[in-house]
Amino acid sequence: MLPVVAIVGRPNVGKSTLFNRLLGKRKAIVEDIPGVTRDRNYARVDRFGRPFLLVDTGGFEPASEDRLLAQMREQSQLAIEEADIILLVLDGKEGLTPSDVEVVELLRRHDKPLLCLVNKIDGPRDEANTAEFYALGLDEILPLSAAHGHGVSDLIVRLEELLPPVRERERAGDETRLAIIGRPNVGKSSLVNRILGYERVVANPIAGTTRDSVDTPFTYNHRSYLMIDTAGIRRKGRVSQKLEKFSVIQALKAMERAHVVLVVIDAAEGVTDQDLTVAGYAEEKGRAVMLVVNKWDLVEKDHTTMGSYVKDLRARFKFLPHAPVLFVSALTGQRVAKIMAEVEKLADEFNRRLPTSALNKVLREAVEAHQPSMFRGKRLKFFYATQTAVRPPTITVFVSRADGVHFSYQRYLANRFREALGLTGSPLRVRYQSREH
Ligand SMILES: Nc1nc2c(ncn2[C@@H]2O[C@H](COP(=O)(O)OP(=O)(O)OP(=O)(O)O)[C@@H](O)[C@H]2O)c(=O)[nH]1
Ligand SMILES: Nc1nc2c(ncn2[C@@H]2O[C@H](COP(=O)(O)OP(=O)(O)OP(=O)(O)O)[C@@H](O)[C@H]2O)c(=O)[nH]1
């Protein structure tokens, strides 16, 4: 499972600066998810020896000293519960403050690895500023300039030493891994129980290596599935609802390991930004996504309700035009049995291997039926298409000028591939590569 590294510290100490510094240029999570305007406070970091999920716990509302301390306690508590490693950022320019002392006390009562960073040590002149922080009695204080990068490589070395070893690959086999995610209280556990109640649970839940994870293998229609549990979200209660991003982390961790992701939406509450955020991440990762609208029993309906609900859903989840949508009630059981039937179809498509001959036939016929427009005075030439990856199915098309394939033509070809190959719900990636002939 992806380890979590949380950055904590008072406002203005440089948490976001450090976050961006560790992230480097490339942000691993899409930032332009339509409909999501909120700041990004978490991202997968892949640039170093071991990938991890980095969380910036900042973003306090401006508050009085008292309120601030309360928020910092809460922030630290969450980091203790959720993170594998905690980076405490202190302000070397401002010096040690009473709230720093308190937070350190709180953090070290637990055995989570803690790295204490004194930031804004921009040059030799500032180094004396670190001295007073030794009063905290910590074994190790790392001077840092998040803004200029000094000390960052030392930090990374320490981080890598502390990160838990990479677990051996997820249990091999061709089972489909299923994650059910959604905001607190949308009915995830009820759905999991319903699904596992219907299907044959093969074994007792296997306790994962981390305390929160309990995956359940089961079979449906003679095929193996693994239900990835997101129980962590359930136990947090009051606190994590305040800092919603921590429940997002659980969802991100589950999605890392999943093939098929069920994004559960509360029918009565409607789509929230958080739903869009996690679905956007699933889309970016190339997971097969299904939108499950739960608590359908609570909605007053006439014959137009479902249609307009779908329309609204499609508009919000524009980036997932193919995701199947189901309206269910975990309470009454209505249509819950359909979920696994849909999952099976989706998983089939998601795992599909497409013969090169079939792909080329589709490509040839599509180009014949509708020629691409000229690019810089020349007709584009399409050579051939072949599948270059599975999960999700990925097709590479070789063409005279990859940059000459207009977006609308890309969409046209992708749709032709989908139609011809019977891919209705699964993501499909089509890449273009230039070739001379
Ligand atoms: N001199 C100096 N300034 C820094 C350094 N790192 C951050 N700053 C400055 O400190 C200020 C606060 O930085 P942020 O990264 O926004 O701090 P933050 O902790 O995320 O703040 P909140 O979002 O309020 O929690 C900005 O003006 C930064 O430019 C540093 O290494 N040296
Ligand atoms: N009316 C109605 N209530 C439901 C339905 N599904 C779940 N609930 C209720 O919604 C509440 C939350 O359900 P849970 O299954 O615990 O939701 P969860 O998403 O696992 O919640 P967290 O543990 O907070 O993440 C419970 O009171 C359920 O009885 C449904 O289809 N209709």
Image (cartoon, rainbow, N blue to C red):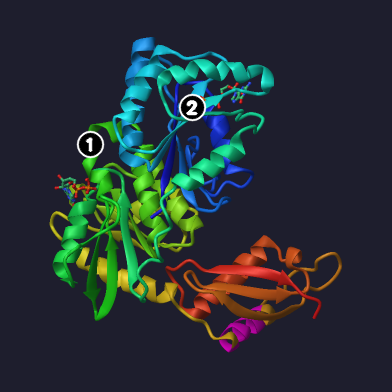
Q: Which numbered disc flags the more N-terminal residue, 1 or 2?
A: 2
Q: Which residue is mark 1?
A: 237
**Which-is-in-front pick, marks 1 and 2?**
2
Residue 260 found in image quarter = bottom left
Range covered by the magenta-colored residues: 357-366
Q: Assign the magenta stretch its main secondary structure.
A: helix
Q: Quadrant of ligand 1?
A: top right
What is the quadrant of the N terminus in the image? Answer: bottom left
**Residue 212: % across, % down:** 26, 50
User: Percent position (x, y) of residue 431?
Assistant: 63, 68
35 lies above or below 380: above
Indicate yes or no: mark 2 CB to ligand 1 under 8 Å: yes
Seen from the viewer's position, the closer of residues 17 and 320 is 17
The residue under label 1 is which amino acid type?
Answer: Gly
Which disc number belongs to residue 89?
2
Whether the magenta-drawn stretch holds residue 198 is answered as: no
Quarter holding residue 93: top right
Query: In the figure, 343 relative to 221: above or below?
Result: above
Q: In the rendered image, which quarter is residue 240 located in?
A: top left
Helix, strand or loop under label 2:
strand
Q: Amino acid at mark 2?
A: Val
Examine the rendering and report whether any part of residue 429 can be seen.
yes
Q: Residue at x 70, y 76 (%)?
A: 398
Q: Residue at x 19, y 63 (%)?
A: 205
Please name the residue shown 25% across and 47% down the image.
Answer: 186
Q: Was residue 359 drawn as part of the magenta stretch in this picture?
A: yes
Above/below status of 271 relative to 348: above
Q: Looking at the figure, which quarter contains the C terminus?
A: bottom right
- Using the rendered image of the protein, determine whether residue 329 is visible from the camera's viewpoint: no
Q: Nearer the viewer, residue 340 or 157?
A: 157
